[in-house]
Image: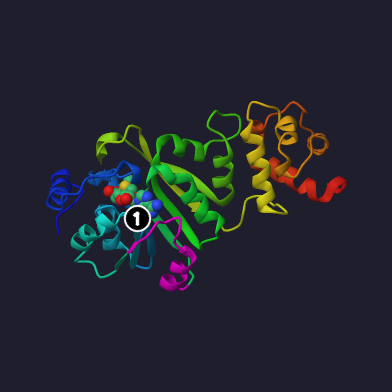
Amino acid sequence: MANLGIPQNTIAVLQRHQFHTQKKYGQNFLIDNSVLDRILRAAEIGPQDCVLEIGPGIGTLTQYLAEQAGEVVAVEIDRNLIPILEETLAGYGNVTVINEDILKVDINRIAEERNGGRPIKVVANLPYYITTPIIMGLFESHVPLDSITVMVQREVADRMQAGPGTKDYGALSLAVQYYAKPEIVANVPPNCFLPRPKVGSAVVRLTRHSAPPVEVEDESRLFALIRAAFNQRRKTLCNAVGNAPESGMSKEGIMAALDRLGLPQTIRGEALTLEQFAKLERYQEKGDQR
Ligand code: SAM
């Protein structure tokens, strides 16, 4: 089987099938073997693993995964890629390709059927236009997950890893860090893809926490509070939350909670740690008792 990590081989496959990449699907195919090796090393795939790949494209990363994993399930939205995948993955008996939109697939069912409900590993060079819904969907639907190792836009990787008080810190940082430990494992320049994207990329590994690092009464209320804080990030937390009834907290409530935590009334959400947001969420529930 031709190695698709070599640009000439990818070009030959695309030409033979008269396939033209589609921007609307975020199609930037990997053409660099050292990057593919790096993704595989970070994902720590072994024969016992069931891997979900999102967007296999022409099967470049899929071939690497199939060499090492016990089983690979690859979900691809573009039906024009299916005949190509049939050709490039013909030699691999442990790969199943599903022609579907990943945002509509029941991933819990895949984990149940393919891996007996045990944690799966997600590995992908993601379509950048839906990075956040894909990652948050995986976490929020409580798919049994061991890790997610994905290529994303560099800026998004920075946001996932950012801590309080930095410009990149926001709702995505807090949500990702609530569920997992993020780690940027490689920076990847545009020339490693065909066609070249306009932005830099990074491989990020998210290792799922076995238990959330903070205690909350109600996860959805924690995230409503975080969203309210960052929807108006230049405002003080009191004003941002006061202007957002969906946060479930009043301006007075947040002022009292901040007081109790020993934090100034002028503080902005971007200065609070995940632990402090969790305490504010718990304070809503138990009032004066904490
Ligand atoms: N894995 C291939 C590689 O590394 O060369 C292709 C990666 S490309 C950045 C993203 C892939 O995701 C494309 O094949 C695209 O068609 C597919 N895709 C886009 N939106 C999708 C969706 N909603 N569900 C499943 N696949 C999708």
Q: Which residues are magenta?
A: 98-116
Question: Toward the viewer: 261 or 81?
Answer: 81
Q: Is 219 placed left or right of 195 in the picture?
A: right
Q: Position of residue 163 (x, y in %)?
A: 57, 35
Residue 285 drawn above or below residue 161: below
Q: Locate residue 287, reporting x and y percent.
A: 85, 47
Kind of residue at disc 1: Ile
* Coloration mode: rainbow
Of residues 164 and 41, the one nearer the viewer is 164
Measured from the top left, where is residue 76 in percent x and y? 33, 57
According to the picture, the residue beneath numbered tag 1 turns out to be 77
Q: Quadrant of the N terminus?
A: bottom left
For residue 123, what is the image quadrant?
bottom left
In percent of width and height, residue 56 lies at: 30, 55
Placement of 111 over or under 198, stated as above or below: below
Residue 245 appears anywhere in the view: yes
For image coordinates 46% across by 51% down, the residue present is 134
In the image, what residue occupies the spot 47% across and 36% down?
Answer: 158
Q: Quadrant for residue 217, please give it.
A: bottom right
In the image, the residue with mark 1 has its CB under 8 Å from the nearest atom of ligand 1: yes
Residue count near mark 1 (Cα–Cα under 10 Å), binned few <14, some 14–19, many ≥20? some
Q: Residue at x 29, y 43 (%)?
A: 28
- Which quadrant would residue 271 be assigned to in this image? top right
For the point 53% across and 55% down, which residue is it? 139
Quick check: is 100 in the magenta stretch? Answer: yes
